Image (cartoon, rainbow, N blue to C red):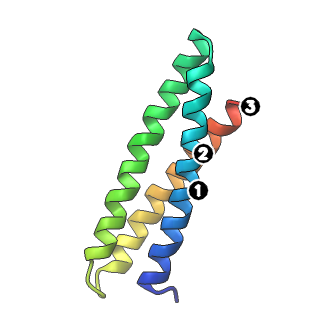
Amino acid sequence: METKETYKKKLEAQLNEWIAQIKLLDARAQNAEAGEKLRYLRDLDVLHAKRREVARKMKELETAGDDAWEKVKVTADDVWNYFRKSAAKAVSSSK
């Protein structure tokens, strides 16, 4: 069974990886032509919103008691999975 601290570190590492991908998309958006730039910006808006949601879940995880953290973990996993899929889709469609 995964401990709260181990899970938190795993989420932080994953989040840092995707923040790097978001920065890459941001740079591509800055250099894109108008039509493509709009698509990048829409994707980035979604990714930034999901990144904030993941950060909120991480804060919940930090403050959750030992009994409650498993519940927070389940919702954090759901949010994380959505974020991961959205980020992967945005990165792959920008190549």
Q: Which residue is mark 2?
A: 21
Q: Residues within 10 Å of mark 1 (few under 14, many from 20)?
A: few
Q: Nearer the viewer, residue 13 or 54?
A: 13
Q: Is residue 47 above or below residue 15?
A: above
Q: Residue furthest top?
A: 34
Check disc 3 and report its element: helix, strand or loop: loop
Q: Which one is in front, 80 or 17?
A: 17
Q: As shown in the figure, which amino acid type bears the numbered disc 1? A: Glu
Q: Amino acid at mark 3?
A: Lys
Q: Is residue 69 left or right of residue 81?
A: left
Q: Which residue is mark 1?
A: 17
Other residues around mark 2 within 10 Å, as few (<14) / some (14–19) / many (≥20):
some
Q: CA distance from mark 2 to mark 1?
A: 7 Å
Which amino acid, by three-letter code, is at mark 2?
Gln
The quadrant in which the C terminus is found is top right
Q: Residues within 10 Å of mark 3 (few under 14, many from 20)?
A: few
Indicate the quadrant where residue 5 lies.
bottom left
Looking at the rendered structure, the secondary structure element under dot 2 is: helix
Q: Residue at left 49%, top 58%?
A: 80
Residue 59 is situated, as x and y percent measured from the top left of the image, at 30, 66
